[in-house]
Image (cartoon, coloured by chain):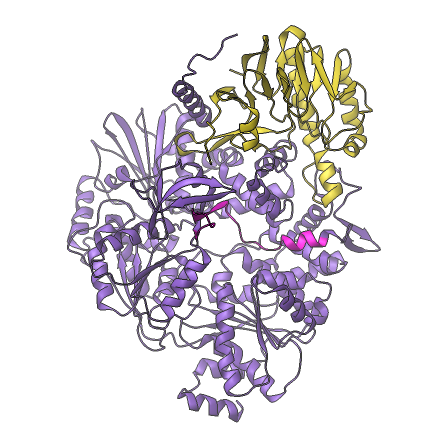
Chain colours: A purple, B yellow
Amino acid sequence: MPAAFHHWFATKGWSIHPHQQEMLDRSDAPALLLIAPTGGGKTLAGFLPTLVDLAVEPRPGLHTLYVSPLKALAADIRRNLSTPVAEMSLPIRVEDRTGDTSQTQRKRQRADPPHILLTTPESLALLVSYEDAPRMFAGLQRVVVDEIHALAESKRGDQLMLALARLQTLVPGLRRVGLSATVEDPKAIARFLAHHPDPCEILRADSGPDPDIAMLTTDEPPPWSGGGAAYAIPAVLEQVRAHKTTLIFHNTRAQAEIFFHKLWLANEDALPIGIHHGSLDKTQRQRVEAAMVNGDLRAIVCTGSLDLGIDWGDVDLVIQIGAPKNVKRLVQRIGRANHRYNAPSKALLVPANRFEVVECVAALEAVRAHTLDGDPRGPGPRDVLCQHILIAACAAPFDADALFAEVTGAGPYAALTRAAFDACLDFVATGGYALRAYDRWQRLKLTEGLWHLRDPRAARQIRMNIGTIQDTDTLKVRLKNRFGGQPLGEVEEGFAATLTPGDTFLIGGQIVRYENLREMTVEVTRRADKPPKIATFMGTKFATSTQLSHRILTMFGQDDWPALPDHTRAWLHLQRDRSRLPEPGRLLIESFPWKGREHAVIYGFAGRNAMQTLGLLTTQRMEALGLHPMGFVATDYAVMVWGLDPLTDPEPLFAAENLRAGFESWLAGNAVMKRTFKASAIISGLIDRQTAGARKSGRQAAFSSDILYDTLRKYDPDHVLMQITREEALKGLVDFGRIEEMLSRTAGRIDLLRLDGITPLSAPLFLEMGRVPVQGAANERLLGEEAARLLEEAGLGAVDKA
Amino acid sequence: MNAQPFTLAGHHLIARASGALYWPAQRLLCISDLHLGKSERIARRSGTLLPPYEVHDTLTRLESEITATEARHVVCLGDSFDDLDSMLSLPEDARLWLTRLMAGRDWTWIEGNHDPGPVTIGGTHRAALALDGLTFRHIASAQKGEISGHYHPKAVLTPKGRQVSRPCFLIDSVRAILPAFGTYTGGLRWSDPVFGALMEPGARAYLTGAAVHVVPMPARRPT
């Protein structure tokens, strides 16, 4: 390290961390992955080699590219880097480039790039699509991918790795650095990051002292069901009072809204407490962030929107409301407290209901044992590849062999077959339909061995559609007044559709009254004269991880549970007396009558999404077997089905072939498939994001992507986009993999217990929300009833019978 | 029920669940906004390559309506083709299919804003058709006893919190507006001000789908 750097560290009173020194020593490695806890000087470790190189040998041109998942993080890093650059007078220009960067600035950056460019995967993909990309990136030495563990969880990471593969072709000596929080499988992240088949070394920073983590004890036991944890509000306020700054994490935005509302009702000392989540208006969020940085807030009620990035400084307590569902995310959240290296983070878990007490204790054990969880990352999705092929065509005509070689250099696509690639290329070029209808209008044409855009003007449209972030159909919410009114955030269109004027709902912690819809904006007032409805948000519903589920099942095998509070311990003992506790290698089913209906509770422990799928599949089978199922409800650990006849022989229900066969036919017509199709159709370039948005402006020319799905299903069911949709749906909401896991774990060892009535473990299921009725022609019947009701109401009961 | 009768200007008409209108006295079948060739036009104009099956699907459904009603006269209420070039570049099999459907019955192409020129594949081409006190026209005018299309009306309901939207007929005492029949067509919400201005209070929507449901149009709200 040059003397200037030693001096700078000294004036700061810092000494260089061992992992920072090591990053510097190994700066020539083709790929390096640094695993470090929050506050470990990770960012500086990533940039030190660049700063030193440019200090020793100043030269113009782009040297280092930094990519982060958050725009805000890019801006934050620019501010942080400006300190050492200014204080050591380094000849280094640092700029960020995101969706918020002005047109003139963007233009200038392409002509005269800074030494260090801070950006996001989407902005990078756009840069790579320009014809002048080879010139702009010519001198690039290094790329730093921040929060790579978060990027690796979504398609944004796949897109980024394809863009890096492109850069690697432009500048073969490019070196990569990944910065990651603690993860369960660093080797998988390393493979994801490295240019295939280059090796990727893994560096681990000292993970610091173990966190100080416990379950919050309250006088009142948690309720039997629900996710609100309202019972814990006095105890949570007590903790907020006793600490400087507390982050209160929730698993969903809706729960955060309700909790925040109730917290304020109980906040007699008027402690300054804010709320932060992804559906709030940007300016609202920024205000909360600024107040946080200034130390003006004692607590923030938040969701995953605060999982990443921005250094908050003085957080000294993290509270997790509701079971953490996933140990890895819990550990990362705990890391948000105490950004000082080598000080233990302090965290409290608040179970929202009785079962979550068990889950929280299991999670605590996992944290103490340092066992993290996570599902293996599947191969790179092909809708992202389709978009990448379009991006490549925008930049320059390409040779298919060369592009195939290039994309298989990206970790997620290393195992991509040529046939799978060719199918994507054919789709992008000709539509890839069984009916070859577009000879004249091919999107890409092959001339002298190179694929190029038939109409170069199409590049503009392709660039406007770059990105993989899925926009849900949301509507903006603003206060109604003569001047347009203050924006508050957004709600899902589906939720907005259920509102009638006068209804109230919670947003950003305030109760607002729905007045009207104006130019696709929900206008509200502060006249709160009714109890609020709860806005729904599409946001991900996390399922309890496989590993955590196993831990709970293993825990059930103990003779006694000294780690559990008495109320929960007694509950489990009672279950053991009355019935049985679920075991890891067996599938427990309880069957009993209750209030004139037969019930079957299947303890599958496969996580919420898979249990929901299992509920749909088993009720479909039960219908076929004549058991008259009437509905079901699913949680992370069980699904309860009710109907007219008792379940006596479960074998045919859980025969793997039967489940799979039922699954195939059920899946094809499912709403999940349509939703997944829409996302993949947008990403792969079949439909425009803009067109998807134009629907909102009420233009009748835009038609629903569901029509395209139905048409393909009817006329071209094996089309590549249908294959992609299937691949993606299986990974996502359907989560069939976990059902398979459950089947192989229990291997036909099914225990059906016939009981007189409700059991202790099944009781909470009766209180669970989200009951799904089983009715074949649900919409038709509902529509018929609704039509009759509306006609009656309008005094039009007697429709003319001509 | 897959059809609902109604009366317009003294004539008994039937709104069919497919979105077609049938006039038994004339054995006349009327459909609107087929938008044939839409995927071809989108490919030509924007490079986006949608599944090229909509002509096939639309004609299949049209044929089954003709068969079911045994119509002697078919009136296509305009925007039958997504533009005149789509008509000219209709695949040969689709052209033959249309010819076969036209054989042995009267066929009227009403012109629409997408296909204002003459239709060159048989049938009669007109700006509007008047028949026994009813007028068939693409875009609604002030005339009474008028059957039109163009707007692609759709109803949006939320029974028990579940949002359901369906293409629909809008019908009052003086006019009927047909839903779009073409496979690749979207809809304009029934709450759109344009319908408020066109339809009388007390107008009803006849929802298409598996069965026809009759629902009063939402009352106009002062904004």
Tell me: residue A123, above or below residue A787: below
Horizontal and vertical percent for residue A213? 27, 66
Count of all numbered marks drawn on residues in the image: 0
Decide: is A138 above or below A801. Answer: below
**Residue A458 is inside the magenta segment:** no
Q: Residue furthest front?
A: A482
Q: Position of residue A544 (x, y in %)?
A: 36, 51
Residue A494 lies, with reference to residue B24, above or below; the image says below
Residue extending farthest right? A448
Residue A662: image x %, image y %?
48, 33
Left or right: B187, with A252 as reference point? right
**Which quadrant of the figure has residue A430?**
top right
- Residue A474 is covered by the magenta coloring: yes
Q: Nearer the viewer, residue B34 or A779?
A: B34
Q: Nearer the viewer, residue A739 or B185?
A: B185
Relative side of A99 to A517, left or right: right
Residues drawn in magenta? A459-488
The picture places residue A316, in percent across and down from the top left corner, at: 30, 70
Most foreground residue, A346 or A637? A346
Residue A307 visible in the displayed image? no
User: Image quadrant of residue A575?
Assistant: top left
Q: Could you tell me which residue is drawn at 62 percent across and 31 percent down? A: A714
Q: Is residue A216 left or right of residue A456?
A: left
Which residue is located at x 22 percent, y 38 percent?
A759
Q: Is residue A561 visible?
A: yes
